[in-house]
Image (cartoon, rainbow, N blue to C red):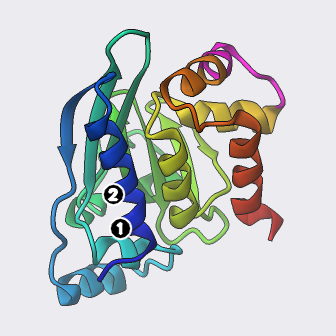
C-alpha cells in the first residue's frame, strides 16, 4: 500500500541520500505491524487523528538524523513506533505531582526529535486537537495541524532542527533567531525551498481555520 506518506518518506530520503552535501547518521523507516495490530492499537486508544492510521499501516515509525557538511544546518526526525506512542509518559511527560486532572497525563509523544522536546498529541481531549509542541517541564503549544499536516510540513522542512518553533514564531508574529536561521539556511541547503510558500502551505493545513 503506497500513497502520500510513501511519497513523503521517499522524497526526504532520496534527497538526503543523493546529495553529497549531507552526512546522514540515521535513516530508517521500519516496516509496519500487521494491519490488524495497527487497527487494534488505534481502536483501543480511540485515535481519530487524520492520517494516523494510514501512516502506521505503511511504516512503524521514522528515524532520520542528518547534518550539512559545509554549513551549520542539521535535521532530526524520530516518529515513534505506534506501539510505543501510547506508553505511559510518567517521569517524562508528567510526574507524581502533576494534578490528576491535568491533560498532560493524556499527552503522547509522536515525534521525539530531540531529548528535551517533542511533538505529540492528546488522547481523550477533543478540546485539544491536532499536534502540539512540548518542551519538557514547560507547557504544550498547539501547532494547529493534524498528523497528516504535520507530515506534509516535515516533507518541506526535511526535519530541520526545531522547525516547529518557526511555526510558533509565525503564530505569535514574533520571528526569533531560530526563524531567522531557518530562513537563511534552508534555501542554501535545499534550493527549491521558499519560506513564503512554506508559510502558505502551513496556513492551508491549519485545522483551526476549517
**Badge 2 local density, few (<14 within 10 Å), some, or many (20+)?**
few
Residue 173 point in image, percent of width and height: 84, 30
Above or below — where is 46 with respect to 21? below
Q: Which residue is mark 1?
A: 6
Is residue 43 found left or right of 189 in the rendered image? left
Residue 176 drawn in magenta: yes
Is residue 11 found left or right of 24 in the rendered image? right
Bounds of the magenta segment: 173-181
**Residue 10 numbered tag:** 2
Name the quadrant of the N terminus.
bottom left
Residue at 60% across / 31% down in the picture? 165
Residue at 43% across / 32% down in the picture? 136
Total numbered labels = 2
Name the quadrant of the C terminus.
bottom right
- What's the distance in space between the residues labelled 2 and 1, CA to CA? 6 Å
Decide if residue 149 is in sight here.
Answer: yes
Q: Residue furthest bottom?
A: 36
Secondary structure, mark 2, is: helix
Residue 148 drawn in magenta: no
Residue 73 point in image, percent of width and height: 43, 18
Residue 177 point in image, percent of width and height: 65, 13
Q: Which residue is nearer to you in this view: 142 or 192?
A: 192
Q: Which residue is nearer to you in this view: 87 or 91?
A: 87
Marks 2 and 1: CB-CB under 8 Å?
yes
Above or below — where is 24 with respect to 77? above
Residue at 32% across / 37% down in the picture? 16
Residue 206 point in image, percent of width and height: 72, 59
Amino acid at each position: 500500500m503506497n500513497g502520500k506518506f510513501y511519497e513523503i518518506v521517499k522524497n526526504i530520503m532520496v534527497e538526503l541520500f543523493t546529495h553529497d552535501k549531507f552526512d546522514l547518521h540515521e535513516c530508517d523507516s521500519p516496516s509496519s505491524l500487521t494491519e490488524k495490530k495497527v487497527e487494534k492499537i488505534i481502536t483501543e486508544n480511540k485515535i481519530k487523528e487524520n492520517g494516523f492510521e494510514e501512516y502506521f499501516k505503511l511504516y512503524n515509525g521514522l528515524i532520520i538524523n542528518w547534518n550539512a557538511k559545509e554549513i551549520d544546518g542539521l535535521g532530526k526526525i524520530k516518529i515513534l513506533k505506534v506501539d510505543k506512542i501510547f506508553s505511559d509518559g510518567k517521569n517524562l511527560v508528567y510526574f507524581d505531582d502533576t494534578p490528576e486532572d491535568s491533560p498532560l497525563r493524556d499527552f503522547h509523544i509522536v515525534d521525539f526529535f530531540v531529548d528535551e522536546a517533542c511533538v505529540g498529541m492528546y488522547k481523550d481531549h477533543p478540546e485539544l486537537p491536532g499536534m502540539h509542541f512540548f518542551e519538557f517541564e514547560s507547557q504544550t503549544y498547539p501547532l494547529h495541524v493534524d498528523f497528516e499536516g504535520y507530515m506534509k510540513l516535515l516533507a518541506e522542512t526535511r526535519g530541520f532542527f526545531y522547525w516547529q518553533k518557526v511555526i510558533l514564531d509565525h503564530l505569535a508574529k514574533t520571528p526569533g533567531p531560530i526563524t531567522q536561521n531557518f530562513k537563511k539556511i534552508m534555501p542554501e541547503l535545499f534550493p527549491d525551498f521558499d519560506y513564503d510558500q512554506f508559510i502558505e502551505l502551513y496556513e492551508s493545513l491549519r485545522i483551526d481555520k476549517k
